[in-house]
Image (spheres, rainbow, N blue to C red):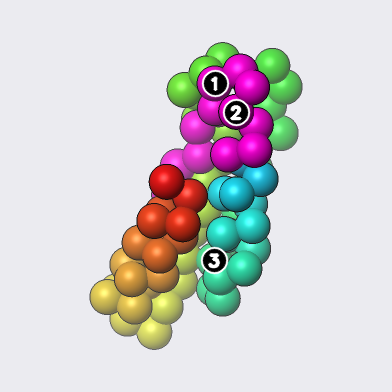
Amino acid sequence: INILEPAEGKKEELERTFKAALGTKDAHLHWYGKKNSKEGRKVGHITVNGDSISEAISKAEEIRNSIK
C-alpha cells in the first residue's frame, strides 16, 4: 500500500495510516523520512504478509478501507 503526502492541513490522514498499519499483525510500515514533500508524492509504503496470498490481500484491504 503506497502512502502519499496528503494535502496541506490534512496531516491527520497520515496518523490514521500509521495507526492502521501498526495495529495490523504482519503489516510493516516503511517511512522514507522525506521532508517537505509535495502533495500526492509517495512518502512511504506498507507491506503485508500472510500465510497465503489471499490472507495478505485481505489484511491489506482492511488497512486500505480503514484509512479511506
Q: Residue at x 56, y 70 (%)?
A: 24
Residue 60 drawn at (x, y percent): 40, 62
Amino acid type indicated by mark 3: Ala
The span from disc 2 to disc 3 (Cα, nearest Å) is: 23 Å
Examine the image and state in which quarter residue 56 appears.
bottom left
Of badges 2 and 3, nearer the viewer stands 2
Amino acid type indicated by mark 2: Lys
Q: Secondary structure at mark 3?
A: strand
Question: Mark 2, residues whose alpha carbon is within 10 Å: few (<14), some, or many (≥20)?
Answer: few
Residue 20 drawn at (x, y percent): 57, 59
Cβ–Cβ under 8 Å for marks 2 and 3: no
Which one is nearer the viewer's eye here, 6 or 50?
A: 6
Q: Residue at x 66, y 45 (%)?
A: 15
The span from disc 2 to disc 1 (Cα, nearest Å) is: 5 Å
Q: Which mark is residue 10?
A: 2
Q: Does the magenta stretch mainly form a helix, a strand or a loop?
A: loop
Residue 47 drawn at (x, y percent): 49, 58
In this rendering, the answer to whether 60 lies above or below 38 is below
In this rendering, the answer to whether 37 lies above or below 61 is above
Q: According to the image, label 3 marks what residue? A: 27
Question: Mark 3, residues whose alpha carbon is within 10 Å: few (<14), some, or many (≥20)?
Answer: some
- Which stretch did the figure color magenta? 1-13
In magenta segment, residue 6: yes
Cβ–Cβ under 8 Å for marks 2 and 1: yes
Q: Which mark is residue 66?
A: none
Mark nearer the N terminus (1 vs 3):
1
Side of 35 relative to 63 (left or right): right
Q: According to the image, label 1 marks what residue? A: 7
